[in-house]
Image (spheres, rainbow, N blue to C red):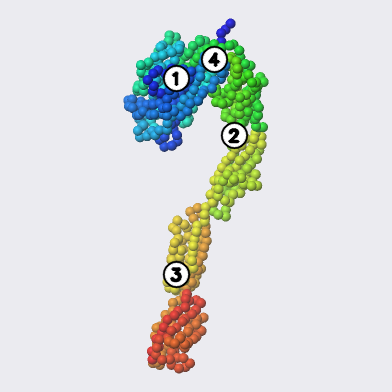
Amino acid sequence: MTRRFTVTFILLYLLAWSAPCWASHIVGGNVRLVATGKTNRYVLGIHLFMDDLNSNVGDVKSEVVVTIYGRRNNIKMGDYKLPLTDKKVISTTNNACVNLRPLKLSEVRYAAELTLDPDRFDDARGYYVVYGTCCRNPTINNIVQPNDAGMVFHLEFPSLKERVNSSPVFSNPVTLYACINKPLTFSFKATDADNDVLRYSLVTPYKGFTSQSNGASNEPSQNYPTVQWQNGFDAGNAVPGSPTLQIDMNTGLLSVTPNQIGLFVFTVLCEELRVEPGNALQRIGSVRRDFQIAVVECPPITPPEPVISLKTSPPSAVTATKNGFLTGVAVCEGQTVTLRTDSLPEWGYQWQRDGVALEGDTLASLVAQQPGTYTIVKRFTNTCGQTSTSPVSVKLDYGTAEAVKIAADGPTDFCPGNGVNLLASNGNYTYRWYKNKTPINGEATSAIRVTEAGNYKVQTTSKATGCVSSDSLAVLVHTNPVVKLENAILARGSALTLNPFGSDTLQYQWSPPASLDNPGMARPKASPATTTTYQVAVTSPQGCTTTAQMTVTVFVRLLVPDAFSPNGDGVNDTWDIRGIEEYPDCTVDIYNRWGSLVYHSKGYAQAWDGKYNGENLPTGMYQYVIRSRDLPEDRRGAVLVVR
């Protein structure tokens, strides 16, 4: 009878605890360095997986210390204290099997937000973060003297002067069980916030400089001492099996079919590569993670294979099947589907996407919202046994709708009073138009007329597939130039500046041009001989035009003598007012010093001779008022009559 066994693999993030004694309660870990998006601010963190059954009170420290060194010459950049931020129990896929090899794991997190000055971290060779501690579980089977072999958690990052960079972050694991001589796959895929290329490999674990007598050490090194493998083991054969433990260099998917009971340690190296000019890949950083796999015996019972079916999907979803099994679902972006399998209380479940367990998705149904290949693992809830995986995976594809584009039949920037037609792609669609994110009522065709500024969006829904597409176009309405003109009064023979506050950034055209020094200027000088109404057309650089007008009222200056001598000698005998003939409608009134009217005329055809009712007025000062609707104002003054 073939014996069956179960593999338990335990993933753990970084350790930074600095206790002076060896620490077999720490199963593994890795460092994490992530840019926050704030200038020069990073979160430096450690996630530890700890074996609570082998831990003592005080093993979980309130803070840990890590050290950063320069890669070029191991110059110490600083020690960094990371406070405890969280501790939680790690779930297991089958609690019933825990009794075969008791494991009670917790995730312990330490983190701090730090300022890393790029002017200080500017070495092109980069930097590394390190923490070393002793020792490993004494029952490990693949390395020599594990109880005296330390662990070094190590992360490399590039110059921060050249780039803001986040290091790869490993996915969170759960405790798993699998049977001997049965293939087991599990993902330790990392994510990278900068979308750099990641490459995975299995490497020999670091031992570092710790020992039973030296429990912690952050000593720098270009080549840390590694553990010594037992005979027959190495980085490519860390877990015996057929095949042995392997990792996909591109996906981080680990696989093994174990054939030996024991506890085995191994290390995954995730290297970070960035595409440089010319499409060359340059290594810019890395992170290491230590793990352990425990192989234990378990009963040879297996639950029925879970078959994935489609519970709900959009009407437009396209499904694919093979031999009666659902193999694929294609939907539009933004849509979801619900996958399901048969459910009974004695079964537990774990959904996976692209080989990675989905945290918290342990029910018989799953709302899938991201593209990928979905599988489900079934286990017994109250009985220890093997797990079974869906015989066929379901690939969820997200298709994009046929791209819709907005075209305009003219310029999309125009002057007030104009407009443009916006034309969406024609097709078997329904249309909805928006202006500044607000639906435009009544617009449900492929074209609209736009006369106002705004951001216009059309959303199309395919009548065949239900997929939605959209496109946007900004429309700008320029303002007309502002022109403020005021009527003016001008004495004949004089000149004035029209539009004294005109802008040289605008174009002007004045008419009539005859009395202007330059009708194409913003501020022309006008010298009309008669009252004239000027019109101007003002055009902005965008081609928008405003018209305005002003009237310049021209008057003739009156030359009024301030004295005359009506004595009959033939010289200056009358009060002759030069220019008054231009005002035939004028009135002239003269008053003596007591305010009595001594002269009045309408028009001034006959000059005043200094008499009142035919009698000579005595020598003296007389006040006068000359009025005309064509004068800018009444003319007032005094005239001396000399006898």
**Does label 2 or label 4 sit earlier along the sequence?**
4
Instruction: Nearest to the eye among marks 2 and 4: give it.
Output: 4
Instruction: Nearest to the eye among marks 1 and 4: give it.
Output: 1
> In the image shown, does 215 or 131 lie closer to the viewer?
215
Query: Mark 1 highlights which residue?
Result: 56
Q: Position of residue 406 (x, y in %)?
A: 58, 42
Q: State the residue at coordinates (35%, 33%).
A: 120
**Does label 1 or label 4 sit earlier along the sequence?**
1
Q: Position of residue 554 (x, y in %)?
A: 47, 73
Query: Mark 2 highlights which residue?
Result: 334
Q: Secondary structure at mark 4?
A: helix
Measure the C-alpha gap from mark 2 to mark 3: 72 Å
For residue 99, which numbered disc appears in the image? Answer: 4
Instruction: Nearest to the eye among marks 3 and 1: give it.
Output: 1
What amino acid is labelled 2 in the image? Answer: Gly
What amino acid is labelled 4 in the image? Answer: Asn
Q: Is residue 526 above or below residue 200?
A: below
Q: Residues within 10 Å of mark 3 (few under 14, many from 20)?
A: many
What amino acid is labelled 3 in the image? Answer: Ser
Instruction: Nearest to the eye among marks 2 and 3: give it.
Output: 2
Instruction: Nearest to the eye among marks 3 and 4: give it.
Output: 4
**Does label 2 or label 3 sit earlier along the sequence?**
2
Q: Is residue 550 above or below residue 468?
A: below
Query: Mark 3 highlights which residue?
Result: 527
